[in-house]
Image (cartoon, rainbow, N blue to C red):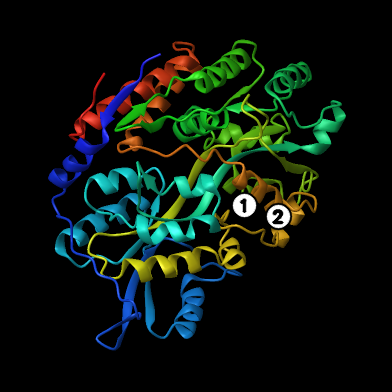
Amino acid sequence: MATTRFTRTAAVVTVGALSAFGLAACSSSDSGTADGEPITIEYMHRLDNGENMATVAEITERWNEEHPDIQVKTTKFDGAATDMILKLETDVKAGNAPCLAQVGYSEAPQLYVKGLLMDVTEHAEKYKDNFSAGAYAGMRVGDVVVGLPQDVGPLVYFYNEAEFEKLGLTPPTTLDELNADSATAAAAGKYITAFSADEATHWLAAQSAAAGDTWFSTEGDEWVVDTEGEGSQVVAALWQGLLDNDHTLKADRWGEPFTAALNDTTLIGHIGAAWEAGFLLDTLDGTEAEGQWRIAQLPDFGAGQLSGPDGGSGVAALKGCEYPAEAMEFTNWFNTQIDDLSSQGLVVAGNGTPETPEKMLRQFGNQDVLAELSTATANMNPDFPYAPGFSTLSSMQETAAGVVAGDKKVADIFTTAQNTAVKALTDLGLPVAE
């Protein structure tokens, strides 16, 4: 099994050399005012303003009323996440970037390396216990914390309870049960999982996390990169067996065959991200299958009741933020407005269980869905941070497509991840030792 390391100290020096923007000076006001006047913090986000949602503007208005010395101005970015990142990069270079911005967990490390984000560890650490450990890890870059978590995507198990009962099945709690139940379902022309090549990057990484692996970690003064650990081997063996025996549906998650299989009850189970609960069953509304599905915790992948992160985002401080302490104070407050953020359809990273909305109650047969998702959030592997260049691991999807075509093995996907991670770090100018 290959491991790759890079020296943390050298990496920090390299970050300074790489940054085209420099390390902007930051100050913090003890009183929450600047020269006796209220300070203003700007926050850019991509959250929705839909019907029956508590909007960011509405939530922030409450903060502003309660904190006259620290006023927050919000801006909604309507484009894609990648477009927002490009805008932030331009704004940081020009010196007019907002203090805070919503960024994906897998994006944060590379943004920090490129000089877009600042180290707010001393200000963020005081709030870490307000969030699940796994979510908080998403805002770490090595030993540096760049912000606070907002929403998460722990893996859970979705299943059609009515169809399971017909087959005499209950949701699997171990991989042995998952394998046995898959065989039973396949014999009846059903599938209790789907192998989705188009989701391979985050989806399989999250399963490795659930199996107890840590892909990017530090030992002493060195980083360790290992995407082919024991957990990944367990995940590879699971899916290779299901594929070889035709016991899993081969369908891209965002393709029509997946939805069709869901609708005609060919697909009656699914390992997916918690955020899918907001829309997974929309096509079943008004049909006989409405209300038949439920959510369970992920089967034990061999490391106990762990889940792994598949998506999610936090609020990070950008270079040039003048008031990082106050910015983190607001971010902590905002990201722990549990019910308000849940109304947005988010699986909230903050501790607490929000009320499950009517739509989810209807679609999941009155199950307290958000309580189940809160459990999954608490169960996320607390030691699975991402590394700079993680976005380039999308090459895993190409290898996964080869697996579906029969040209590759599932283990090859994790080898692709290892090789790609090494190249990504090298291309970013970070020192890498074999």
Left or right of 155: which side holds 173? right
Q: Is residue 79 visible?
A: no
In the rendered view, tell whether residue 281 sits above or below residue 183.
below
Query: Which corner quadrant holds the N terminus?
Result: top left
Query: Distance from label 1 to label 2 (Cα)?
Result: 7 Å
Residue matched to label 2: 360
- Tag 1 and tag 2, C-beta contact below 8 Å: yes
Rendered residue at 56%/18% (across/down): 234
Residue 362 versus residue 3 in the image, above or below: below
For label 2, the SS is helix
Q: Percent from the top left, x then y, of residue 387?
A: 35, 37
- Look at 75% across and 17% down and name the residue there: 180
Badge 1 marks a residue whose secondary structure is helix
Residue 426: percent from left, percent from top = 21, 29
- Which residue occupies the extreme front position in the image? 220
**Residue found farthest to the bottom:** 36
Q: Position of residue 248 (x, y in %)?
A: 64, 21
Q: Which mark is residue 278?
A: 1
**Mark 1 Cα-neighbour bin, 10 Å: few <14, some 14–19, many ≥20:** some
The residue at 30%/36% (across/down) is: 389
Residue 100, quarter of the rendered image: bottom left
* In-front residue for pair 27/424: 27
Q: Position of residue 348 (x, y in %)?
A: 56, 56
Location of residue 45 (image quadrant):
bottom left
Question: Where on the picture, by quarter, is residue 68?
Answer: bottom left
Which residue type carries mark 2? Answer: Met
